[in-house]
Amino acid sequence: MFYQTIDILGTVAFAISGVLVAMEKRLDLFGVLIIAFVTAIGGGTLRDLLIGNTPVVWIRDLTYVITIGVTVFFGVLFVNQLKYLRKSLFLFDTIGIGLYTMLGIEKGLQAGLSPVICIALGTMTASFGGVIRDILCNEIPVIFRKEIYATACILGGGSYFLLTLLPIGENYAYIAAILVVISLRLLAVKFKIRLPNIYQKEV
């Protein structure tokens, strides 16, 4: 029940970020629904295919499809109440990557994979829905820019395995790791912490 709740919250967060991008691009209702859908389930679908967890979860369980549909309905209905579109998008996207990083790690652990591969799965789960969303909306995906994005997922995932070595409950380690991902992303943007630019400035 704990993990399913986290999964649904992640689905809602990413669906809202998809709605915001699609509305900003002035897509029609069908376009908004599709962008919200691929944002919410894109990373999880890729993860499930890689570990052989098929049919993928949203095909087996209509809860996810219904959740996305309801989220799109309320997202479109109340989009005008979201006064700061960019800030709202950033917030929901950040919450989404925190929740989905740990969901991917949990799926990897259930499949008996090593911690390194679990972290990679968590990063993929958190990032690739947004990658598909940005490509469909003709944007350079955030993960490929200088912003701290996938790095936050990797560090947060690593913190989970370190926290499990401490005498604290597994659920507390899980929640703490989610907060690490979210906090790293927020701090990186606030203080403009970025990965080094490998390109030399033109003379």
Image (cartoon, rainbow, N blue to C red):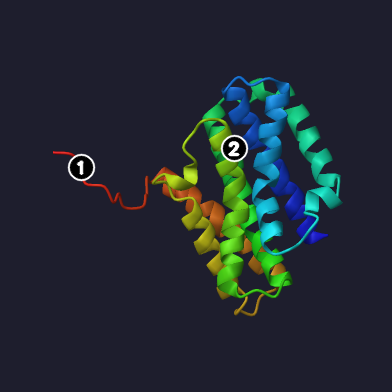
List x then y, in percent, for residue 6.
73, 54
In this rendering, position of residue 84 left or right of residue 59: left
The residue labelled by disc 2 is 133
* Left or right of 157, for residue 51: right
Q: Which residue occupies 62% across, 27% down? A: 22
**Of the residues shown, which amino acid type is indicated by label 2?**
Arg
Q: Is residue 1 above or below residue 199?
A: below
Residue drawn at x 65%, y 41% as measured from the top left: 39
Q: Secondary structure at mark 1?
A: loop
Q: Which mark is residue 201?
A: 1
Residue 100 percent across, percent down from the top left: 65, 54
> In the rendered image, which quarter contains the N terminus?
bottom right
Amino acid type for the residue under numbered disc 1: Lys
Quadrant housing residue 161: bottom right
Label 1 neighbour load within 10 Å: few <14, some 14-19, many 20+: few
**Is residue 141 something that shows in the picture?**
yes
Q: Residue 123: x, y in percent? A: 57, 57
Q: Residue at x 44, y 46 (%)?
A: 144
Question: What percent of the width, then of the height, locates residue 202?
Answer: 18, 39
Q: Say which of 196 and 91 sits in front.
A: 196
**Residue drawn at (56%, 74%) of the image:** 162
The answer for how far apart the CA atoms under marks 1 and 2 are is 30 Å
Asked which secondary structure carries label 2, the reply is: helix
